[in-house]
Amino acid sequence: MQSNLQEDDPILTTSEVARLLGVATSTVQIWMESGAIESWKTPGGHRRTRLSLVQGLMHGDDQARSTPNPSTDKEYQPASQPGYPVGVGERSRLAALAATGLVDTDEEARFDRLVRLASMVTGSPIALISLLTSTRQWFKARVGLAGRETPRDWAFCSHAILKNELFVVEDAMEDERFRTNPLVLQEPHIRFYAGVPLRDKSGQPLGTLCVIDREPRRLRAAEVQGLIDLAEIASSEIQATGRNVRN
């Protein structure tokens, strides 16, 4: 019985999965590491999965519908001439973001609580959990801001995800990178920004937990630590999403 089961549902390598799905092997590796494709590691450190798990993606189960394909979806492909700074691993970062399936999903209490706390801890009128595709800055959770997204070109968070620590702009009008930004000159009239990268299990920066004020300011040490702690919780929630992502 066990032998028949193994024959009907063989073990696949990352390369074999890539051929079945029509994507790059590196993309499959990211999907496996993030949990978008259920898998396990061999003693040699290689990822493996079962054919049935891949067929579920191919035949349109819930996870497949919520996970964009970075090989075909332009929003998850690096921009040819980006109007924002990018790291050397932008292609892998976008594939990792696609694997979460979080962009364009409904609001969730677990993330809403974190932005409310970030706003209260730092005394900031605006707090956001942002996710960065190649074209958009999309907000999974937000306090103090009506819009759900902005163009990626406008995103302060594009600068923040290049850092391994808190990224702060104390006065955007005095910073040549941001003084002509539409988000500074128009609503919400950003003057102060502080953002911490949110990372998946492989360490890819998917977006930020950030706070914004309409007045120049600085964060106190306790506020900095509070924001960093909340960002770590937000990252843990993203990492725990895996195959439980909802449409």
Image (cartoon, rainbow, N blue to C red):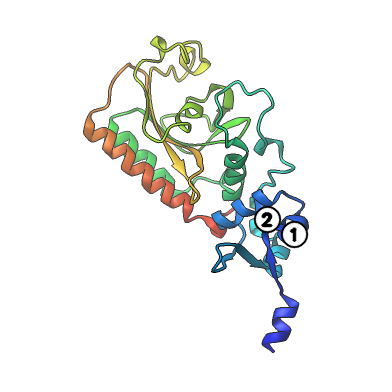
Please name the residue shown 73% across and 85% down the image. Answer: 4
Examine the image and state in which quarter residue 145 appears: top left
Q: Quadrant of the N terminus?
A: bottom right
For label 1, the residue is 58
Q: Position of residue 219 (x, y in %)?
A: 27, 27
Choose between 84 and 115: the one closer to the eye.
84
Q: Which amino acid does the dot numbered 1 rest on? A: Met
Checking the image for residue 123, the label placed there is none
Q: Position of residue 21 (x, y in %)?
A: 75, 55
The outermost residue toward the bottom is 1
Q: Position of residue 188 (x, y in %)?
A: 45, 20
Per the image, label 2 sits on a secondary structure element best described as helix
Decide if residue 240 is in sight here: yes
Please name the residue shown 65% across and 58% down the image. Answer: 62
For label 2, the residue is 64
Choose between 158 and 59: the one closer to the eye.
158
Mark 2–mark 1 distance (CA, rounded to whole Å) = 7 Å
Is 6 on the left or on the right of 212, as rendered?
right
Examine the image and state in which quarter residue 138 appears: top right
First-in-chain label (2 vs 1): 1
Q: Which amino acid does the dot numbered 2 rest on? A: Ala
Is 177 on the left or on the right of 86, as rendered?
left
Cβ atoms at labels 2 and 1 below 8 Å apart? yes
